[in-house]
Image: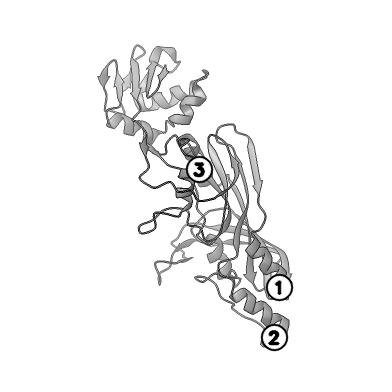
Amino acid sequence: MFHSNIIKLKVSDYPIQNGRIDKWIIEAFSLLNSSYQDDIKAKTPFSRTKIKELILSGNISIDGRINKNPSYKIDSDNIIVINLPKIKDYDLKAENIPIDIVFEDEHLLVVNKEPNFVVHPSPGHNSGTLVNAILYHCDGKLSGIGGIKRPGIVHRLDKDTSGLMLVAKTEIAHLSLSDMFKNHSIERNYQLLVWNVPDSNGLIDQPIGRSKFNRKKMAINLNGKKAVTHWTLLETFSNLVSLISCKLQTGRTHQIRVHMSSIGHSLIGDKIYGGLTKTNKKQNSIQKNIISKCKSFSRQALHSKTLTFQHPISKKQMHFDIDLPNDIKNLINSIK
């Protein structure tokens, strides 16, 4: 039985009639097939951690008595009542900032993020972000992430990176999508401009961690986390600049920027990991013009172009492809 913020479960109604209460609740909800199953799922993602939090906070009772023991053994004649805490408002201002919504349903958003747009608030930067914009756009339509009405940012793009981002609107979608990213089952492809001309395709399998020399930077680090990037050469310009596609097998901070820089093909406009590493000593006027235009490009030329994933609720295969933004297009046209 499901009423507002209270869920009442009779153990004898389910084939699993004993065991630990935390495990039982998770299994019970996986077996629900009534008409309100999706409604419950959209509002109450019963992960093991969530159930434990509810138990320890006194929000689950057995036969009218509050139980704070996650390993409590239940019996077939028990009645379990789950009291769901009221969803809290997010302590962040919703702001009417235009955003490009590529897809939206009650569970998630796919956003085409513009460059020079910070994704998540941080100390000293709590306005003008993508999260502020989504709070405004989804006014009253967020069911709560971690008990707070906020969008679930399951992956991030750097401020200066453009393109597709996936955002959860419900906690069950957030948990499911986070697991997909963790298991590398979401396919992401980027397009980028790099210095020089790499091989037609290749793979970089080098761990990434904090730089030993600058803690604000990432670097190839043998003690870092596994990172794998696949690249394919798409087009070259005067043997100085290349347009390539990168497919991420993992998702480490600054992964593409670090990996491409490590093999001598840093991104155009990357002020942290970039820079033209080598050129012919003799350059004609066309090459000099290309170098000048690329060095004046105001951001890293990196674009999240495609996203492919299984919808966390409907299980439908979803695919999105967004064109390069105007600034990268204009740079390409100017150096052809």
Q: How packed is label 1: few (under 14 Cα within 10 Å), some, or many (20 or more)?
A: some
* Picture residue at 30% right of the left edge, 29% below the top: 55
Q: Which residue is mark 2?
A: 283
Farthest residue, direction front: 96
Asked if residue 144 is positioned above or below residue 212 in the image, the reply reads above
Asked if residue 15 is positioned above or below residue 42 in the image, the reply reads above
Report the amino acid beneath label 3. His
Farthest residue, direction bottom: 282
Q: Reading the chain from its start, which is encountered first: label 1 or label 3?
A: 3
The image quarter containing residue 193 is bottom right
Rounded to the nearest angstrom, the CA distance separating label 1 from label 3 is 38 Å
Secondary structure under badge 3?
helix
x and y, in percent, of residue 37 in the image: 50, 23
Secondary structure under badge 2?
loop
Q: Which residue is mark 3?
A: 137
- Residue 261 visible to an observer of this rendering: yes
Q: Which residue is mark 1?
A: 335
Q: Is residue 249 left or right of residue 61?
A: right
Rounded to the nearest angstrom, the CA distance separating label 1 from label 2 is 15 Å
Q: Reading the chain from its start, which is encountered first: label 3 or label 2?
A: 3
Which of 333/145 is in front? 333
How many numbered discs?
3
